Amino acid sequence: MKTLLLNPGPVTLTDRVRQSLLQPDLCHRESEFYDLQDEARARLLDVYRLDPKAWSAVLMTASGTGAVESMIASLVPLEGKLLVVQNGVYGERIASIAKQYGIAHEVVTHDWMQAPDLARIEASLDANGPFSHVAIVHHETTTGRLNDLRDIGALSRSRGARLLVDAVSSFGAEAIDFDGANIAAVAATANKCLHGVPGASFVVARRSAIDEAASRTYYLDLARLAKLQSQRGTPFTPSVHAYYALVEALREFEEDGGLEARHARYAALAEQVRGSLAARGIDSIIPAEQSSVVLRSYALPRGIDYQTLHDGLKARGFVIYAGQGDLSKQLFRVSTMGDMNAQDVERLADAFDFLTR
Ligand SMILES: *Cc1c(COP(=O)(O)O)cnc(C)c1O
């Protein structure tokens, strides 16, 4: 039985992406590798139709956190200051990264069920500024909430700050208005909405932001990575096979209709999951209009703990995902990323019936 992954990455691969891993062994100092790297970088900008004169996609061998760390540690200038908007685990992680690097920062914390509170963010911008950057998680995978970037981007612009966005679980699936939201950079990974394999991550940054980058970190130094990659180079040994898969996944993404098509596909699957669980008395926790199309949180059925639900579904071929921290007692999560379709969701819905048999 094939197991379908409903966790927020790594995803169930398409056969095409899996087969791409079997291409020839490649030395990362040969032109064939740089062709691959160039294609990945160009296609990443194409996902959001970004102008390569203004934007650069910088690859690194790391998980998504590596890309977020590279972005935060590099793009807040030495004299800069960061405001972190936190309404989940991943916002908390950004604050931890800023602390670890000794970056001047403030945090506006929220309950993990809450949307960012613009009035409190505005108050902190005014009381503790000036800030060079505001960091926000686009899709807070902790709960499935899609944080609105436009309002916070506009507010930041009015105070002279640009956004640094953790788009690890939204890049490729949710609209991002790079100019309208006053974005300096977004960080993301190959193995979520793009359907590649783990090991390759990236930052899409304004060239002007890279020009002002600080060099606080060695391996994740974004300006060095950007410079060498633009010269068809690389500082270290990249995860070559993950790059094969990323490029194949990006080709497939484009052939399938790009961002709009992926968004529509995820939206249909997510709504199908929501409807079929609602029919079984299992409610989503965040209203659909405030949720991403990528992942949704659901209340654990009364009297059923996560492990029981997980194990029952896994025995039927589905891997769901626990809530983080204390949320593990309240909710479970279902992602609709990866190679899955409407029939899979029907089978998933049927699998839930083990609870009532
Ligand atoms: C998955 C995820 C990350 C990074 O996780 P890794 O395990 O390092 O790949 C960061 N931010 C968000 C919002 C995520 O969903």
Image (spheres, rainbow, N blue to C red):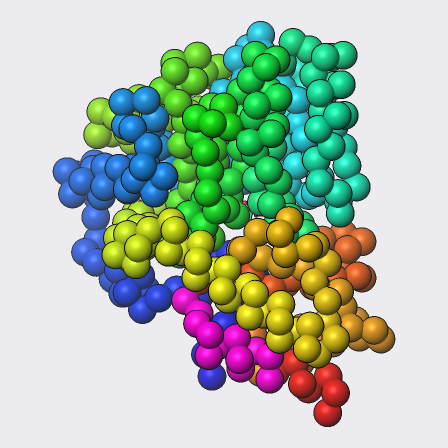
* Rendering coords of residue 181 (x, y %): 51, 28
* Rendering coords of residue 351 (x, y %): 61, 83
Q: Is residue 341 magenta?
A: yes
- Image quadrant where one finds the C terminus: bottom right
* Rendering coords of residue 293 (x, y %): 54, 55
**Rendered view: 58 above or below 173:** above
Q: Residue furthest bottom?
A: 357
In the image, 159 versus 38, the foreground residue is: 159
Q: Which residues are magenta?
A: 339-350
Name the main secondary structure of what is drawn in magenta: helix
**Rendered view: 3 above or below 125:** below
Please report the residue visible at 80 percent of the width from the left and 62 percent of the height from the top. Answer: 329
Q: Is residue 38 left or right of residue 208?
A: left
* Rendering coords of residue 5 (x, y %): 52, 67
Q: Residue furthest left?
A: 31
Please report the residue visible at 65 percent of the width from the left and 80 percent of the height from the top. Answer: 352
Q: Is residue 101 left or right of residue 245?
A: right
Please report the residue visible at 30 percent of the width from the left and 40 percent of the height from the top. Answer: 46
| Residue 132 seen in this snapshot | no
